[in-house]
Amino acid sequence: MYKFAWTPALALLLVSANAFASIGSGNSARSERMAMDVHQSFDAQRQSIEADLADGKTYSELSDSDRSKVTEALQRMGSLLHDAGGVAALDEAQKVRVFNDQELVNSLLSRAAEDSRLICRREKQIGSNRTTTQCMTALQRNRQTERARKDLTDSATSSQR
């Protein structure tokens, strides 16, 4: 149900691209080829993340505002990387911006992954010995628990009046 492999890959891409670019800085043809590989890898990962955001199944628990934050951060990262020609060509301020955007994307998608995790329980229905499997996402289960807690406190306060 859930594909979450791209976020760590995105983090590793930027770190490894910086290391490779510094190693290959003596050979301009090699560094240009690596810069092209970084652009293609980043673009492929960005397209995959955006497709996962659009499909409605993956990252289903991500709010619309968080979806737009992820999309905007990916666009900022892409434009900075493309304008500079790669991670190695970024100045320190640009590297900080790319890193901050990367952290934003990673944290939002990680939280969405945690909330989208499917939890199944075998439960007996009241008045029956037959068990059924009840599956909900972690966020749905948390909302249900909070709603039950709120209903319980509301009923307790209304009975005291």
Image (cartoon, helix red, strand yellow):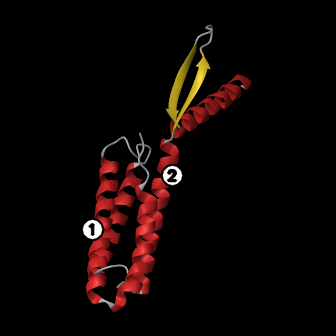
61 relative to 47, above or below: above
Q: Secondary structure at mark 1?
A: helix
Residue 11 placed where, x, y %? 45, 66
Q: Quadrant of the N terminus?
A: top left
Q: Residue at x 32, y 66 (%)?
A: 42
Q: Secondary structure at mark 2?
A: helix
The crowding category of the residue bearing disc 1, from other C-alpha atoms within 10 Å (few below 14, some 14 to 19, many at least 20), is few
Quadrant in the rendering for residue 16:
bottom left
Q: Label 1 is placed on what type of residue? A: Gln
Q: Which residue is mark 2?
A: 111
31 relative to 74, above or below: below
Q: Quadrant of the C terminus?
A: top right
Upstream in sequence: badge 1 or badge 2: 1
Tag on residue 40?
1
Q: Residue at x 31, y 83 (%)?
A: 31
Q: Residue furthest bottom?
A: 26
Residue 44 placed where, x, y %? 29, 61
The crowding category of the residue bearing disc 2, from other C-alpha atoms within 10 Å (few below 14, some 14 to 19, many at least 20), is some
Q: Label 2 is placed on what type of residue? A: Arg
Residue 40 placed where, x, y %? 27, 68
Total numbered circles:
2
Q: In the displayed structure, does residue 142 sit left or right of residue 155?
A: left
Of residues 153 and 50, the one nearer the viewer is: 50
